[in-house]
Image: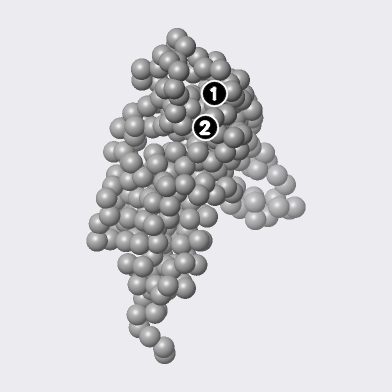
Amino acid sequence: MTDSGARTDKSADRSTGGATGRSAGSRAGKGADRGRLPRGTLSQELIVRAAFRVADSSGMEKLTFQALGRELSAHPTAIYRHFRNKDELLLALIDALHEEALANTPPPTDDWAHDLMQIAVHTHEAFMRHPRVGALAAARTARRENEFRSVERKLDCMRRAGLDDTEAARYYRVFADLVLAYSAMDASLAALSPELRDADLGAWQTDYLTLPPEKYPNIARFAPKFVGLDDPQNFVTAVQAVIDTVRVRAEDRARGPK
């Protein structure tokens, strides 16, 4: 791994200890009033915080406007004044994940590769703190302020890497989609019931190790070296591969035509 990846591991370890206190879900619990909310005090922010509480504890299928009304001690019709439907609420939750990731990501440095890795790691951590929302986030476009801010920071890194505009836009897309897709996949695994998750994780140490080598020679050779599906280094390795590709492409461009 490059120096930027090594620095990331240390920074990620530091951020994990304090990030939860700033998370969208944990912020929500402070000062929650179990009595009826005063008229006119309900806001999108309060609803989003309550939605994280419901989703984190019960799952997205239980996140209904009726459940939110009970959580907020408000009539469900009051929630419709802020969100037209559950999908609009989901997009707000996804944007809140971006907000949480940005809040925990250190300010930019003079090392674009390190900065990209930091953005990736803290995005992944936000998804993992709220896996039931994160599992649904990869394919959606929130088109809200915090998503815009996240895109801006990634594009800044690509520009500072030395790519031209066309390549910066392309590699931004590859990088961002990898981060979101991998984070959502890991969140989906974390959101499974313990029984299903343990069965999937254990299969790589049981089923794959007992396959007949004459039928699956490559699996037999490599199965003892398989790492866990939930090994956090998998994500860092994937992100680092994209960063390394961007670095090589930028260096090739700087050298000019052969």
Which of the pair 181/154 is nearer the observer? 154
Work out which quarter of the rendered image holds the C terminus and state it. bottom left
Residue shown at 65% from the left, 51% from the top: 219
Kindly state the secondary structure of the residue where label 2 is placed. Answer: loop
Q: Is residue 38 visible?
A: yes
Q: Residue 106 in the image: x percent, y percent?
A: 28, 47
Mark 1 near mark 2, Cβ–Cβ under 8 Å?
Answer: yes
Q: Residue furthest right?
A: 215
The crowd level at tag 2 (other Cα within 10 Å; few <14, some 14-19, many 20+) is: some
Which of the pair 241/156 is nearer the observer? 156
Quadrant hosting residue 192 = top right
Which of the pair 173/185 is nearer the observer? 173
Q: Residue 149 in the image: x percent, y percent?
A: 39, 51
State the separation of the CA atoms marked 1 and 2: 8 Å
The image shows residue 107, relative to residue 23, as above or below, that is: below
Q: Residue 117 in the image: x percent, y percent?
A: 37, 53
The image shows residue 198, relative to residue 175, as above or below, that is: above
Quadrant hosting residue 210 = top right
Left or right of 218? Residue 169 is left
Residue shown at 50% from the left, 61% from the top: 173
Work out which quarter of the rendered image holds the N terminus and state it. bottom left
Q: Mark 2 points at which residue?
A: 82
Q: Which amino acid does label 1 sit on?
A: Ala
Disc assigned to residue 78: 1
The image shows residue 124, relative to residue 170, as above or below, that is: above
Left or right of 54? Residue 150 is left
Q: Residue furthest front?
A: 40
Q: Residue 215 in the image: x percent, y percent?
A: 75, 52
Q: What residue type is labelled 2?
A: His
Disc assigned to residue 138: none
Q: Which residue lies furthest to the bottom in this view?
A: 258
